[in-house]
């Protein structure tokens, strides 16, 4: 009887030990299953590529964009465009024209340059003092290549507009030329090249500018070449 009781007790302990092991194994497998399920729920992102459509096919399939009723009555901007004044359109100069300017350069002597400046100062003294005046000797950058005419800073600050405006140049024959005055740079840009070429200005010439109106100059040209004529 005692042996049977000991056997039953040993069997009961063995069963309980097996249950504990089974429970431990089930928890282990359950956690492993949870991890696998979580990994399966987050697939690696795959970039979708857009299917390429041949250009010919795209042209045949593409339809014109629909416009809402509110926009349909508006004018088409692609047809009705505001025209930019042709005078101030930027004109690209070719390399050949620049090269031609450089080849035709005239270099004044110091004597001819000084003579033109003296004559210009004499003309300045004879003009009506009620109109502002300044003289400007010509250099290569004024009459060839860049064709940029910088004006005296003090004159610009005191008499000329504070913003970009068209300045009219009136020569001695009362012919008008239009140039663009750049207020920040204090000089004449577009239009000055045409004036210089039309009046055949060269290095050493000296110009007298008389401001007769708010945006209008009377321009008197003193030629450096007149120095050689005076010598004769």
Image (cartoon, rainbow, N blue to C red):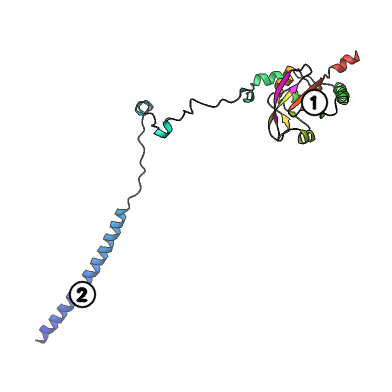
Q: What stretch is highlighted in magenta?
A: 169-181
- Residue appearing at x 17%, y 75% in the figure: 15
Please name the residue shown 79% across and 18% down the image: 172
Residue at 74 percent across and 17 percent down: it is: 175
Q: Name the residue under label 1.
A: 209
Residue 102 at what x, y percent from top left?
A: 72, 20
Q: Residues within 10 Å of mark 1 (few under 14, many from 20)?
A: many
The Cα–Cα distance between marks 2 and 1, rounded to whole angstroms, is 117 Å
Q: In which quarter of the image is the N terminus?
A: bottom left
Q: Where is residue 153 in the image (x, y as percent from the top left)?
A: 78, 35
Nearest the camera: 18 or 53? 53
Q: In which quarter of the image is the C terminus?
A: top right
The residue depicted at 68 percent of the width and 32 percent of the height is: 164
Say which of 91 and 53 sits in front.
91
Choose the circle earlier in sequence order: 2 or 1: 2
Q: Which residue lies furthest to the left in this view?
A: 1
| Residue 161 part of the magenta segment | no
89 shown above or below 23 = above
């Amino acid at each position: 009887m005692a042996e049977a009781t000991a056997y039953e007790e040993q069997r009961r302990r063995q069963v309980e030990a097996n249950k504990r092991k089974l429970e431990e194994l089930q928890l282990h497998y359950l956690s492993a299953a949870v991890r696998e399920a979580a990994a399966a729920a987050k697939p690696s992102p795959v970039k979708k590529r857009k299917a390429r459509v041949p250009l010919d096919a795209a042209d045949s399939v593409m339809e014109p964009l629909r416009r809402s009723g509110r926009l349909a009555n508006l004018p088409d901007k692609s047809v009705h465009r505001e025209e930019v004044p042709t005078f101030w359109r930027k004109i690209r100069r070719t390399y050949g024209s620049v090269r031609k300017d450089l080849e035709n350069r005239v270099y004044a002597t110091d004597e001819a340059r000084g003579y033109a400046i003296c004559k210009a100062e004499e003309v300045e003294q004879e003009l009506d003092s009620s109109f502002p005046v300044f003289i400007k000797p010509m250099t290569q950058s004024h009459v060839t290549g860049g064709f940029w005419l910088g004006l005296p800073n003090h004159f610009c600050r005191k008499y000329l507009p504070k913003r970009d405006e068209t300045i009219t140049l009136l020569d001695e024959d009362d012919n008008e030329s239009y140039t663009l005055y750049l207020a920040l740079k204090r000089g004449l840009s577009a239009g000055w090249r045409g004036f210089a070429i039309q009046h055949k200005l060269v290095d050493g010439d000296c110009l007298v500018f008389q401001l007769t109106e708010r945006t209008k100059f009377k321009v008197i040209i003193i030629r450096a070449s007149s120095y050689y004529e005076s010598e004769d």
